[in-house]
Image (tube, rainbow, N blue to C red):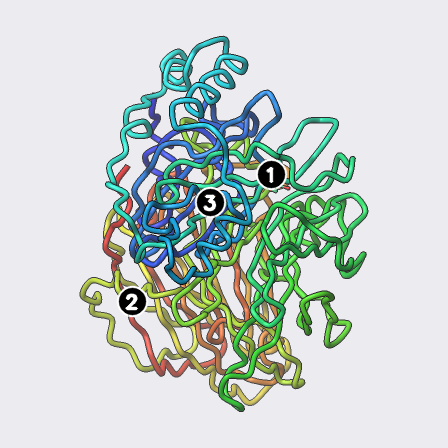
Amino acid sequence: HETLADKQYRPKIHFSPSTGFMNDPNGLIFDGRYYHLYYQYNPFGPYAGHVHWGHAVSTDLYTWQDLPIAIRETEAGEAYSGCAVLDRDNRSGLFPPRTQDKPQPGAVETAAQKAAQLFSPLPGDEQERRSVDRQAQDLLHGGRTDTDLLKELGNDPVSREQSPVPMSPALPPMAGGLVAIYTRATPQRQTQYIAWSPDGGQTLKDYEGNPVLDIGHNSFRDPKVLWHAPTEKWVMVVVRSREHKVSFYGSFDLKHWMHLSDFGPSGITGVDYECPALAEVEVEGETPGEKRWVLFVSINPGGPQGGSITQYFVGQFDGERFTPDDTIVDLTDFGKDSYALQTYENMPGNQTVYVAWLDNWQYCEELPNKSWRGIMTIPRKVVLRRDTSGWLRIAQNPYQLEALRRPAIPFALSRLEPQSSRQVALPTGEAVELLLDVSLEDRGSTLPDGDHGRAGRFAVVFSNRQGESLSIGFDGFSCQLWLDRSNLHGFSHPFFTGTFSSALIPGSRRFSLRIVLDACTLEVFANEGMSVGTALVYPANPLETLSLQVTNAAAVIHKVALYPLRQTMDR
Ligand code: FRU
């Protein structure tokens, strides 16, 4: 049954599952019409386990429609994290040849026709395959379907089992289609599987020759595959988790994989490397079209903020080996609730856009909401930008969030005198976006002054009548940003730490903030995305007021705008 907490903390623009437990985003791909979001999913309860692949689709990355479970736990193991690619030309041979692909006598063969002949498609007709599916189901749950199980567990399966989206052919006819590459996991073994979709991603059918990659290992998981055009092959990044190695494999058909190289241990090792991602990312400004490769590696546990975190490396990738440009190790986030990010495959304009799990393994199974658990971040666009020392760092910003803005809440303000504040009421039950561009004026002294900070502090405070508050602020002496969720009383846990900080531009008293607050999620993008903080936030009572406050120095407000955001998720 849905509790008050389940309702109160349910995000309005972020994806969360209707019931059950969700972790990593999987199979992120744009198929020309739909953005797919598959995800690690336990449909049976609000805890990690019995991992299936849940599935939703969207045309804007904010409005998601649930689809039936795409990959199930079977007797071969749980369906751990993985990715999806579009095999347009049926290089895998997984897709049965379409009638129009059958060579006509005397006709010139297309590449697709050749491929279809080279690789024999899965034997057996549809009926046979269905019966194999049923047999697996029987083995797993003693003949009961997931729907039965969900009913027994008191969950409402209807929304999951009825597909609200007609999955009409997404793209101009292709010889192939969508292929998922993922890990089958048992306590003894983790191996890589592939599954192909006969219907644009709605159902995924395991290849009968699985596993396609088995090194006899029990911590070898989370394949992310991309098409490497210069060498005309697929490249897989996958981790040997406990050894802190990212392994690179290459394939021409997704079925046969050749080991190319290894990267690591490098950076922060933590206990396990998980969910690697590799993307060619645009470098802002300077030379148009300049790109560099970024390798993302999630670590859990052992992140510097505690628990789960994602680090990244900037470098070159030649189709075989990743070579970092420098020895810098950086994290994608200064908070502790952004994990296991995956970049979207096939994004329009080759943009790099990712979605991460807005959570942390330290407390994800004990959150106050109980009938559902797990939230995805909003989609974030990544570019590379030089920092003040000239190093290329990632800058991350909300992707096309502007489309959700409703008319701004009037909030005219150009200056705040020292020890003053300005308040505005927050809309009830809506997600909001706050934009700020602020300079702290020089106070003429850097000497300590009580507890107001030496050279001025600026704070954005979300609060309520019950005395709870959530603040994001800037300290003018140290030029650092803080995020403080400790004065919220809806959740306490030894690892649910309260405050986080990030160093902004040394010596600069000007900073910008873009803050998205949606139910129990807070995302802070500072200085056009150079510093990003993601945090779960659990006020016991709704936050009602936004206040901008300054102490010990005057603040010039170059820009302030507060937007309610149109609700996209109706659960
Ligand atoms: C990361 C992770 C992956 C694994 C999945 C299991 O959060 O531990 O390494 O594939 O979750 O759900």
Q: CA distance from mark 1 to mark 2?
A: 38 Å
Q: Quadrant of the image for the N terminus?
A: top left
Q: Residue furthest top?
A: 142
In the image, is the residue at mark 2 within 8 Å of ligand 1 by its beta carbon? no
Q: Residue at the location (62% across, 82% down)? A: 506
Q: Tell me: 33 left or right of 550.
A: left
Under mark 2, the amino acid is: Glu
Q: Earlier in the sequence, mark 1 or mark 2?
A: 1
Under mark 1, the amino acid is: Tyr
Q: Is residue 554 above or below residue 49?
A: below
The secondary structure type at the circle numbered 1 is: strand
Q: Are marks 1 and 2 in contact (CB under 8 Å)?
A: no
Measured from the top left, where is residue 169 in percent x and y? 28, 49
Measured from the top left, where is residue 248 in percent x and y? 71, 56
Of circles 1 and 2, which is in front?
A: 1
Q: Earlier in the sequence, mark 3 or mark 1?
A: 1
The secondary structure type at the circle numbered 3 is: loop
Q: Is residue 123 above or below residue 526?
A: above
Under mark 3, the amino acid is: Leu
Q: Which residue is mark 2?
A: 402
Q: Which residue is mark 3?
A: 488
